[in-house]
Amino acid sequence: MKIIILAAGQGTRLRPLTDKQPKCMVKFRGNPVIDYIIAAAKKNEINNIVVVDGYRKDVLEHHLAGQHIKFITNESYENTNMVSTLFCALPELNDDIIISYADIIYTPDIIQKLMEDQCEFSVIVDKDWRKLWAMRMDDPLLDAETMKIDSEGRIYELGKKTQSYDDIQGQYIGLIKVKKSFIKTFIDYYHGLDKTLMYDGKNFNNMYMTSLIQSIADNIKRPKAVFIEGGWIEIDSVEDLNVYESYAAFTPYI
């Protein structure tokens, strides 16, 4: 098992904290966000760790020096999004892999659940998402996205805007597993997409990860929803950081 951490972004909503360091280096309760991600992986004996960096990679690579982590750089981080960042690590897509955003903190048991799931293509889904969203905003529907799951526990819609809680059976958190047996299909499908089209309002290079997952679900295979009930946070803005500092129910591992 290998984990690929997508850490190329600038984190503009976290400025001024990201003026001189990448988003994943912002500290939560005294430690950089990425340290929690790496600790959760190592707790599950995942020692094959790849970080795709970009913005202020010097700061990140210096911080993680000596930890036997492989770095790959998205040189076009200013003009691309998560999917492009992932495929900068194409040579590393050769095993069972976990793909993790770098602005989320989660407990090690969430990684364990993902590893234990036997499906080729799996996505972590938080069923208790409303508690977290309510801490961040008065109306969770302003930010939440659709998550529709069929009777077999497979996702058939995600990442769309909605005005109804009926469309939300959970929330995508930014953690995916793709098994080696599905990797070639996953890669070939991405490379076969029409690069001239728009995907949920974004061009090919700025495609959201949810857009890629949706397209695969529509055309190849619906991913399995691996359910959790809390145990994670997203640090996307200074406001998030302030709210979660006092979130006593959340105790990350490090």
Image (tube, grey):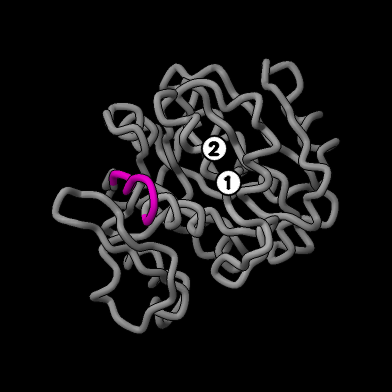
Please state which amino acid type lies under the numbered disc 1: Gly
User: Of helix, strand and loop, which one carries label 1?
Assistant: helix
Compared with residue 125, is residue 122 higher up or lower down, i.e. above or below?
A: above
Q: Quadrant of residue 120?
A: top left
Check if mark 2's residue and mark 1's residue have beta carbons within 8 Å. Answer: yes
Residue sitting at x 45%, y 56%: 215
Q: Quadrant of residue 58?
A: top right
Please state which amino acid type lies under the numbered disc 2: Asp
**Mark 2 burial class by Cα count in 10 Å: few <14, some 14-19, many 20+:** few
The image's mark for residue 188 is 2
Q: Position of residue 22 (x, y in %)?
A: 75, 48
The image's mark for residue 112 is none
Q: Is residue 109 left or right of residue 205?
A: left
| Range drawn in magenta | 218-224
Q: Quadrant of residue 126?
A: bottom left
| Residue underneath mark 1 | 192
Q: Is residue 76 magenta?
A: no
Asked whether 108 or 69 is in front, the reply is 69
